[in-house]
Image (cartoon, rainbow, N blue to C red):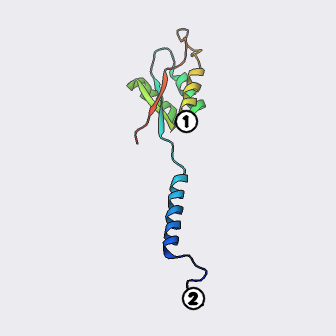
């Protein structure tokens, strides 16, 4: 019996390995690029409202929500969440749907909120 019986030639084996590697690279799950959800400061919403929103919509612990609220107040804006684009869009819509601050008569609508691509 010869060694060649029952086994494919070396060239065929190398080709099938190369095809398998190429197929694996094409079918790998690609990570979605990250997006930031950004909230803007204004004078129509109380600190309590912003903290409440950050806790309820983004599940931030109270100390983190307070720190983000101060950042929004002091810098005029803050990145409050980073995720893939679809979820960032959902979170933006939730912020906008949260509506006016019932604690302030001058509050006529939601906080300013937008998304942008995150670095990296």
Q: How many residues crowd around disc 1 within 10 Å: few (fewer than 14), some, or many (20 or more)?
A: some
The residue wearing badge 2 is 2
Where residue 38 appears, as percent x and y from the top left, is: 47, 28
Q: How many residues crowd around disc 2 within 10 Å: few (fewer than 14), some, or many (20 or more)?
A: few
Where residue 100 appears, as percent x and y from the top left, is: 57, 15
Q: Quadrant of the C terminus?
A: top left
The residues tagged by marks 2 and 1 sit, at their Cα atoms, a distance apart of 70 Å
Q: Give the mark count.
A: 2
State whether residue 62 is above or below residue 100. Answer: below
Q: Earlier in the sequence, mark 2 or mark 1?
A: 2
State whether residue 86 is above or below residue 77. Answer: below
Using the image as rendered, state which of residue 100 and residue 90 is in the foreground: 90
Q: Quadrant of the N terminus?
A: bottom right
Q: Residue furthest bottom?
A: 1
Residue under the image location 52 percent in, 35 percent down: 85
Where residue 97 appears, as percent x and y from the top left, is: 60, 21
User: In which quadrant of the rendered view does residue 41 lie?
Assistant: top left
Residue under the image location 49 percent in, 24 percent down: 113
State whether residue 105 is above or below residue 61. Answer: above
> Is 47 displayed left or right of 77 in the figure?
right
> Is 40 displayed left or right of 60 in the figure?
left
Q: Nearer the viewer, mark 2 or mark 1?
A: 2
Residue 48, label in figure? none
Q: Secondary structure at mark 1?
A: loop
Using the image as rendered, state which of residue 51 and residue 119 is in the foreground: 119
State whether residue 7 is above or below residue 43. Answer: below
Q: Secondary structure at mark 2?
A: loop
The residue wearing badge 1 is 60
Using the image as rendered, state which of residue 119 and residue 64 is in the foreground: 119
Q: Residue furthest top?
A: 105
Using the image as rendered, state which of residue 24 and residue 88 is in the foreground: 24
């Amino acid at each position: 019996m010869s060694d060649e019986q029952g086994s494919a030639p070396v060239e065929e084996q190398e080709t099938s390995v190369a095809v398998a590697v190429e197929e694996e690279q094409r079918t790998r799950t690609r990570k979605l690029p990250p997006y930031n959800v950004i909230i803007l400061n204004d004078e129509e919403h109380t600190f309590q409202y912003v903290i409440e929103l950050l806790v309820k919509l983004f599940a931030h612990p109270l100390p983190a929500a307070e720190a983000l609220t101060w950042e929004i107040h002091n810098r005029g804006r803050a990145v409050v969440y980073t995720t893939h684009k679809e979820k960032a869009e959902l979170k933006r819509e939730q912020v906008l749907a949260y509506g006016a601050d019932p604690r302030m008569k001058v509050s006529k609508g939601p906080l300013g909120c937008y998304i942008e691509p995150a670095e990296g």
